[in-house]
Image (spheres, rainbow, N blue to C red):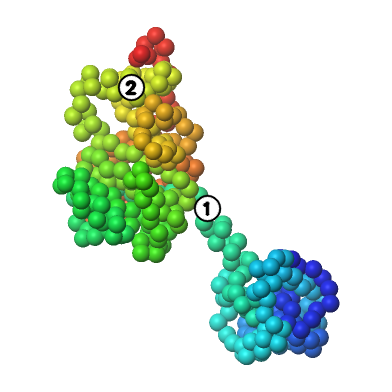
Amino acid sequence: MKWLPGRCRTGDLIRVHLGSVCHYGVFVSEDEVIAFGLPPVEQYRDDPRRLIVCSTDIDTFACGSIVEIAHAENRQERRKRRPPKKAVADARARLGETGYNLLHNNCEHFARECVFGEHRCELEEAAVRRWRERPVCAVYLAAVDDMAKEDAVYPPERAREIRRCTDPGLRAAKTADWALLELAVKQVFGREPESLTFRCSRHGKWSCEELYFSLSHAGGYAAAAVSSAPVGVDMEGVEAFFARRTEEEIRLMAKRAMTSAEHRRWGGDPAAFLTCWTRKEAVFKCRGRGAFRPAAADADDAGVRSCRVMAGDTELALALCGRHSAQARFYLMDGDGAHPVTPRFDDTPQTVDPDAAAE
Protein backbone atom coordinates (compact mmCIF):
# COMPACT_ATOMS: atom_id res chain seq x y z
CA MET A 1 0.00 0.00 0.00
CA LYS A 2 1.38 3.39 -1.01
CA TRP A 3 0.11 6.67 0.47
CA LEU A 4 0.26 9.87 -1.59
CA PRO A 5 -1.42 13.29 -1.37
CA GLY A 6 -3.75 14.07 -4.26
CA ARG A 7 -7.30 14.64 -5.40
CA CYS A 8 -9.72 12.37 -3.52
CA ARG A 9 -12.32 10.33 -5.40
CA THR A 10 -15.47 8.64 -4.16
CA GLY A 11 -14.67 5.35 -2.41
CA ASP A 12 -11.02 6.24 -1.64
CA LEU A 13 -9.33 5.10 1.55
CA ILE A 14 -7.80 8.25 3.03
CA ARG A 15 -5.81 9.23 6.10
CA VAL A 16 -4.27 12.23 7.85
CA HIS A 17 -1.34 12.42 10.26
CA LEU A 18 -2.33 13.97 13.57
CA GLY A 19 0.78 14.14 15.70
CA SER A 20 2.07 10.62 16.28
CA VAL A 21 -1.10 8.87 15.05
CA CYS A 22 -3.07 8.59 11.81
CA HIS A 23 -6.82 8.95 11.37
CA TYR A 24 -8.46 6.92 8.56
CA GLY A 25 -11.74 7.27 6.70
CA VAL A 26 -13.71 6.59 3.52
CA PHE A 27 -14.01 9.56 1.18
CA VAL A 28 -17.43 10.15 -0.39
CA SER A 29 -17.30 13.85 -1.22
CA GLU A 30 -15.97 17.11 0.17
CA ASP A 31 -19.06 17.16 2.37
CA GLU A 32 -18.98 13.52 3.44
CA VAL A 33 -16.16 11.47 4.92
CA ILE A 34 -17.15 8.40 6.95
CA ALA A 35 -14.82 7.28 9.74
CA PHE A 36 -14.88 5.31 12.95
CA GLY A 37 -14.86 8.23 15.35
CA LEU A 38 -13.86 11.85 15.11
CA PRO A 39 -10.21 12.86 14.75
CA PRO A 40 -8.30 12.12 18.00
CA VAL A 41 -7.64 15.75 18.89
CA GLU A 42 -8.43 17.76 22.02
CA GLN A 43 -11.31 19.76 20.53
CA TYR A 44 -13.42 16.57 20.07
CA ARG A 45 -12.54 14.97 23.44
CA ASP A 46 -16.10 15.40 24.82
CA ASP A 47 -18.01 14.97 21.54
CA PRO A 48 -20.43 11.98 21.70
CA ARG A 49 -19.37 10.97 18.18
CA ARG A 50 -15.76 10.53 19.28
CA LEU A 51 -15.89 6.69 19.25
CA ILE A 52 -18.74 5.81 16.86
CA VAL A 53 -18.88 5.51 13.07
CA CYS A 54 -19.90 8.97 11.91
CA SER A 55 -19.94 11.28 8.91
CA THR A 56 -18.15 14.64 8.74
CA ASP A 57 -16.93 16.98 6.02
CA ILE A 58 -13.34 16.81 4.75
CA ASP A 59 -12.23 19.85 6.78
CA THR A 60 -13.39 18.31 10.05
CA PHE A 61 -11.74 15.01 9.13
CA ALA A 62 -8.40 16.58 8.16
CA CYS A 63 -8.03 19.08 11.04
CA GLY A 64 -5.80 21.21 8.81
CA SER A 65 -3.45 18.31 7.91
CA ILE A 66 -2.59 17.01 4.45
CA VAL A 67 -4.92 14.24 3.26
CA GLU A 68 -3.20 11.14 1.85
CA ILE A 69 -4.84 8.58 -0.45
CA ALA A 70 -4.14 4.85 -0.44
CA HIS A 71 -2.87 3.49 -3.77
CA ALA A 72 -2.67 -0.24 -4.53
CA GLU A 73 0.92 -1.19 -5.37
CA ASN A 74 0.40 -4.63 -6.90
CA ARG A 75 -2.15 -6.83 -8.64
CA GLN A 76 -3.25 -8.52 -5.42
CA GLU A 77 -4.07 -5.20 -3.77
CA ARG A 78 -5.86 -3.97 -6.91
CA ARG A 79 -8.03 -7.11 -6.94
CA LYS A 80 -9.03 -6.49 -3.33
CA ARG A 81 -10.12 -2.91 -4.06
CA ARG A 82 -13.93 -2.83 -3.92
CA PRO A 83 -16.07 -0.80 -6.34
CA PRO A 84 -16.51 2.77 -5.02
CA LYS A 85 -20.30 2.47 -4.74
CA LYS A 86 -19.95 -0.75 -2.73
CA ALA A 87 -17.34 0.78 -0.41
CA VAL A 88 -19.50 3.84 0.23
CA ALA A 89 -22.68 1.79 0.73
CA ASP A 90 -20.97 -0.43 3.31
CA ALA A 91 -19.53 2.58 5.14
CA ARG A 92 -22.94 4.30 5.29
CA ALA A 93 -24.59 1.08 6.48
CA ARG A 94 -22.34 1.12 9.53
CA LEU A 95 -23.09 4.68 10.64
CA GLY A 96 -23.70 4.74 14.38
CA GLU A 97 -21.73 1.52 14.97
CA THR A 98 -19.91 1.28 18.30
CA GLY A 99 -17.35 -1.16 19.73
CA TYR A 100 -14.22 0.92 19.09
CA ASN A 101 -10.96 -0.64 20.28
CA LEU A 102 -7.66 1.15 19.81
CA LEU A 103 -5.72 -2.00 18.93
CA HIS A 104 -8.26 -4.44 17.47
CA ASN A 105 -11.15 -2.39 16.02
CA ASN A 106 -10.14 1.17 15.21
CA CYS A 107 -10.62 3.67 12.38
CA GLU A 108 -8.08 1.93 10.12
CA HIS A 109 -9.77 -1.46 10.56
CA PHE A 110 -13.09 0.15 9.61
CA ALA A 111 -11.88 2.08 6.56
CA ARG A 112 -9.77 -0.78 5.16
CA GLU A 113 -12.67 -3.19 5.57
CA CYS A 114 -15.01 -0.90 3.64
CA VAL A 115 -12.57 -0.19 0.78
CA PHE A 116 -10.44 -3.35 0.59
CA GLY A 117 -12.58 -5.91 2.40
CA GLU A 118 -9.94 -6.76 5.01
CA HIS A 119 -10.03 -6.10 8.75
CA ARG A 120 -6.42 -4.94 9.08
CA CYS A 121 -4.43 -2.27 10.87
CA GLU A 122 -0.71 -1.47 10.63
CA LEU A 123 -0.67 -0.43 14.29
CA GLU A 124 -2.04 -3.81 15.38
CA GLU A 125 0.34 -5.72 13.10
CA ALA A 126 3.33 -3.78 14.40
CA ALA A 127 2.25 -4.48 17.98
CA VAL A 128 1.90 -8.20 17.19
CA ARG A 129 5.38 -8.24 15.61
CA ARG A 130 6.91 -6.57 18.64
CA TRP A 131 5.08 -9.01 20.91
CA ARG A 132 6.31 -12.03 18.96
CA GLU A 133 9.88 -10.71 18.80
CA ARG A 134 10.12 -9.87 22.51
CA PRO A 135 12.83 -11.79 24.40
CA VAL A 136 10.81 -14.60 25.97
CA CYS A 137 12.43 -17.63 27.55
CA ALA A 138 11.20 -19.72 30.48
CA VAL A 139 12.16 -23.09 31.91
CA TYR A 140 9.64 -25.19 33.86
CA LEU A 141 10.70 -28.08 36.09
CA ALA A 142 8.50 -30.70 37.71
CA ALA A 143 8.71 -34.15 39.24
CA VAL A 144 7.90 -36.83 36.66
CA ASP A 145 5.51 -38.56 39.07
CA ASP A 146 3.44 -35.39 39.38
CA MET A 147 3.13 -34.63 35.67
CA ALA A 148 2.86 -38.21 34.34
CA LYS A 149 -0.63 -38.43 35.84
CA GLU A 150 -1.98 -36.46 32.89
CA ASP A 151 -4.32 -38.68 30.86
CA ALA A 152 -3.41 -37.43 27.39
CA VAL A 153 -1.18 -35.01 25.54
CA TYR A 154 -1.69 -33.05 22.33
CA PRO A 155 -1.33 -33.66 19.42
CA PRO A 156 -2.69 -37.21 19.06
CA GLU A 157 0.40 -38.23 17.05
CA ARG A 158 2.61 -37.40 20.01
CA ALA A 159 0.29 -39.27 22.38
CA ARG A 160 0.46 -42.37 20.16
CA GLU A 161 4.26 -42.09 19.98
CA ILE A 162 4.47 -42.02 23.78
CA ARG A 163 2.11 -44.99 24.18
CA ARG A 164 4.34 -47.07 21.87
CA CYS A 165 7.24 -46.66 24.33
CA THR A 166 7.73 -50.06 26.01
CA ASP A 167 9.82 -48.84 28.97
CA PRO A 168 7.35 -47.70 31.69
CA GLY A 169 9.84 -45.27 33.23
CA LEU A 170 10.68 -43.67 29.90
CA ARG A 171 7.01 -43.54 28.93
CA ALA A 172 6.21 -41.71 32.18
CA ALA A 173 9.07 -39.25 31.62
CA LYS A 174 7.96 -38.50 28.05
CA THR A 175 4.39 -37.99 29.21
CA ALA A 176 5.59 -35.70 31.99
CA ASP A 177 7.80 -33.44 29.88
CA TRP A 178 5.10 -32.99 27.22
CA ALA A 179 2.41 -32.29 29.83
CA LEU A 180 4.82 -29.77 31.36
CA LEU A 181 5.29 -28.20 27.92
CA GLU A 182 1.53 -27.73 27.57
CA LEU A 183 1.39 -26.03 30.96
CA ALA A 184 4.36 -23.76 30.11
CA VAL A 185 2.79 -22.74 26.79
CA LYS A 186 -0.43 -21.75 28.57
CA GLN A 187 1.33 -19.75 31.27
CA VAL A 188 3.98 -18.02 29.15
CA PHE A 189 2.20 -17.50 25.82
CA GLY A 190 -1.44 -17.78 26.87
CA ARG A 191 -2.05 -20.43 24.20
CA GLU A 192 -4.00 -23.65 24.41
CA PRO A 193 -2.13 -26.67 22.97
CA GLU A 194 -4.99 -27.30 20.49
CA SER A 195 -4.36 -23.86 18.93
CA LEU A 196 -0.76 -24.76 18.03
CA THR A 197 0.67 -26.66 15.07
CA PHE A 198 3.16 -29.37 16.07
CA ARG A 199 5.32 -31.28 13.59
CA CYS A 200 7.78 -34.15 13.85
CA SER A 201 10.87 -34.27 11.60
CA ARG A 202 12.20 -37.42 9.98
CA HIS A 203 14.81 -37.48 12.75
CA GLY A 204 12.07 -37.63 15.36
CA LYS A 205 12.46 -34.04 16.59
CA TRP A 206 9.21 -32.25 17.43
CA SER A 207 8.72 -28.55 16.71
CA CYS A 208 5.95 -25.95 16.79
CA GLU A 209 5.16 -23.36 14.12
CA GLU A 210 4.04 -20.67 16.57
CA LEU A 211 6.86 -20.83 19.15
CA TYR A 212 10.04 -22.70 20.10
CA PHE A 213 10.48 -25.35 22.77
CA SER A 214 12.84 -28.01 24.07
CA LEU A 215 12.35 -30.89 26.51
CA SER A 216 14.50 -32.97 28.82
CA HIS A 217 14.09 -35.41 31.69
CA ALA A 218 16.51 -36.87 34.22
CA GLY A 219 16.83 -37.63 37.90
CA GLY A 220 13.09 -38.10 38.29
CA TYR A 221 12.37 -34.61 36.94
CA ALA A 222 11.13 -33.21 33.64
CA ALA A 223 12.10 -29.88 32.06
CA ALA A 224 10.33 -27.84 29.40
CA ALA A 225 11.88 -24.68 27.93
CA VAL A 226 9.73 -22.33 25.82
CA SER A 227 10.95 -19.27 23.97
CA SER A 228 10.28 -16.78 21.18
CA ALA A 229 13.58 -17.89 19.57
CA PRO A 230 15.20 -21.31 18.99
CA VAL A 231 16.01 -22.92 22.33
CA GLY A 232 17.60 -26.08 23.70
CA VAL A 233 17.58 -27.46 27.24
CA ASP A 234 19.35 -30.45 28.75
CA MET A 235 19.32 -31.70 32.29
CA GLU A 236 20.96 -34.42 34.41
CA GLY A 237 20.33 -35.45 37.99
CA VAL A 238 23.78 -34.97 39.56
CA GLU A 239 23.60 -37.86 42.04
CA ALA A 240 22.00 -40.24 39.53
CA PHE A 241 24.52 -39.35 36.82
CA PHE A 242 27.49 -40.34 38.95
CA ALA A 243 25.74 -43.28 40.63
CA ARG A 244 25.29 -45.16 37.36
CA ARG A 245 28.80 -44.52 35.97
CA THR A 246 32.25 -45.36 37.23
CA GLU A 247 35.07 -42.85 37.08
CA GLU A 248 36.62 -44.86 34.26
CA GLU A 249 33.39 -44.72 32.24
CA ILE A 250 33.18 -40.97 32.76
CA ARG A 251 36.81 -40.59 31.69
CA LEU A 252 36.11 -42.52 28.48
CA MET A 253 32.98 -40.46 27.80
CA ALA A 254 34.98 -37.27 28.25
CA LYS A 255 37.68 -38.50 25.91
CA ARG A 256 35.14 -39.19 23.15
CA ALA A 257 32.89 -36.22 23.70
CA MET A 258 35.22 -33.34 24.49
CA THR A 259 37.68 -31.71 22.14
CA SER A 260 41.22 -30.95 23.31
CA ALA A 261 40.28 -27.29 23.60
CA GLU A 262 37.29 -28.18 25.80
CA HIS A 263 39.50 -30.34 28.00
CA ARG A 264 41.78 -27.37 28.48
CA ARG A 265 38.91 -24.96 29.15
CA TRP A 266 36.72 -27.12 31.39
CA GLY A 267 39.22 -29.34 33.10
CA GLY A 268 39.16 -33.09 33.49
CA ASP A 269 37.25 -33.68 36.72
CA PRO A 270 33.85 -35.45 36.51
CA ALA A 271 31.83 -32.43 37.68
CA ALA A 272 33.31 -30.29 34.90
CA PHE A 273 32.53 -33.01 32.38
CA LEU A 274 28.91 -33.17 33.51
CA THR A 275 28.59 -29.40 32.97
CA CYS A 276 30.27 -29.65 29.58
CA TRP A 277 28.07 -32.59 28.55
CA THR A 278 24.78 -30.84 29.35
CA ARG A 279 26.00 -27.72 27.53
CA LYS A 280 26.74 -29.77 24.41
CA GLU A 281 23.31 -31.40 24.51
CA ALA A 282 21.59 -28.03 24.90
CA VAL A 283 23.56 -26.54 22.00
CA PHE A 284 22.64 -29.47 19.77
CA LYS A 285 18.96 -29.26 20.67
CA CYS A 286 18.98 -25.56 19.87
CA ARG A 287 21.07 -25.54 16.70
CA GLY A 288 21.77 -29.09 15.56
CA ARG A 289 20.22 -31.37 12.96
CA GLY A 290 20.30 -35.11 12.45
CA ALA A 291 22.07 -37.32 15.00
CA PHE A 292 23.79 -35.88 18.06
CA ARG A 293 27.59 -35.96 17.73
CA PRO A 294 29.02 -34.69 21.05
CA ALA A 295 32.43 -33.70 19.72
CA ALA A 296 30.78 -31.48 17.07
CA ALA A 297 28.69 -29.48 19.57
CA ASP A 298 30.55 -26.48 20.99
CA ALA A 299 30.21 -26.39 24.78
CA ASP A 300 31.29 -22.75 24.70
CA ASP A 301 28.64 -21.57 22.24
CA ALA A 302 27.90 -17.91 22.99
CA GLY A 303 24.22 -18.62 23.68
CA VAL A 304 24.58 -21.42 26.25
CA ARG A 305 24.39 -21.10 30.04
CA SER A 306 24.87 -23.82 32.63
CA CYS A 307 23.62 -23.96 36.20
CA ARG A 308 22.65 -26.12 39.14
CA VAL A 309 19.06 -26.15 40.41
CA MET A 310 17.76 -27.64 43.64
CA ALA A 311 14.39 -29.37 43.14
CA GLY A 312 13.43 -30.63 46.55
CA ASP A 313 16.34 -32.83 47.65
CA THR A 314 17.49 -33.41 44.05
CA GLU A 315 20.33 -31.39 42.53
CA LEU A 316 19.95 -30.94 38.78
CA ALA A 317 22.71 -29.93 36.37
CA LEU A 318 20.99 -27.92 33.65
CA ALA A 319 22.13 -26.15 30.50
CA LEU A 320 20.08 -23.76 28.37
CA CYS A 321 20.98 -22.53 24.90
CA GLY A 322 19.27 -19.83 22.88
CA ARG A 323 19.21 -16.17 21.91
CA HIS A 324 17.31 -15.25 25.08
CA SER A 325 18.95 -17.65 27.55
CA ALA A 326 20.35 -14.74 29.57
CA GLN A 327 16.78 -13.47 30.19
CA ALA A 328 15.38 -16.90 31.09
CA ARG A 329 13.11 -17.36 34.09
CA PHE A 330 13.00 -20.66 35.97
CA TYR A 331 9.96 -22.20 37.66
CA LEU A 332 9.48 -25.30 39.78
CA MET A 333 6.06 -26.95 39.76
CA ASP A 334 4.44 -28.48 42.82
CA GLY A 335 0.91 -29.05 44.05
CA ASP A 336 0.42 -25.32 44.62
CA GLY A 337 1.48 -24.22 41.12
CA ALA A 338 4.64 -22.76 39.57
CA HIS A 339 7.17 -21.11 41.86
CA PRO A 340 10.17 -19.03 40.68
CA VAL A 341 13.55 -20.58 41.48
CA THR A 342 17.01 -19.03 41.33
CA PRO A 343 19.59 -21.30 39.70
CA ARG A 344 23.27 -21.21 40.61
CA PHE A 345 24.98 -20.41 37.31
CA ASP A 346 28.41 -21.73 36.42
CA ASP A 347 29.25 -20.42 32.96
CA THR A 348 32.97 -19.79 33.45
CA PRO A 349 35.34 -22.55 32.36
CA GLN A 350 38.32 -23.28 34.58
CA THR A 351 41.27 -23.24 32.22
CA VAL A 352 43.83 -25.92 33.13
CA ASP A 353 47.37 -26.74 32.20
CA PRO A 354 47.39 -28.23 28.65
CA ASP A 355 49.68 -30.98 29.88
CA ALA A 356 47.00 -32.04 32.37
CA ALA A 357 44.23 -32.14 29.78
CA ALA A 358 42.94 -35.55 28.83
CA GLU A 359 44.07 -36.70 25.43
Q: Quadrant of residue 264?
A: top left
Disc marking residue 134: 1
The front one of 104 and 311 is 104
Note whether 137 is above or below 69 in the view shown: above
What kind of residue is marked 2? Answer: Arg
- Answer few, some or many: residues within 10 Å of disc 1's Cα (few below 14, many 20 plus, some between 14 and 19): few
Q: Residue at x 62, y 69 (%)?
A: 121
Disc marking residue 54: none
On the question of residue 310 being in view, the answer is: yes
Could you tell me residue 79's position as x and y percent?
66, 73
Could you tell me residue 236's position as x and y percent?
28, 36
Which quarter of the rendered picture does the N terminus lie within? bottom right
Q: Residue at x 50, y 49 (%)?
A: 135
Could you tell me residue 69's position as x and y percent?
77, 73
Could you tell me residue 186's position as x and y percent?
37, 60
Specify which label sits upstream in the sequence, 1 or 2: 1
Q: Which residue occupies the extreme right position in the image? A: 7
Q: Residue at x 26, y 56 (%)?
A: 159
Disc 2 secondary structure class:
helix
Disc marking residue 256: 2
- The span from disc 1 to disc 2 (Cα, nearest Å) is 39 Å
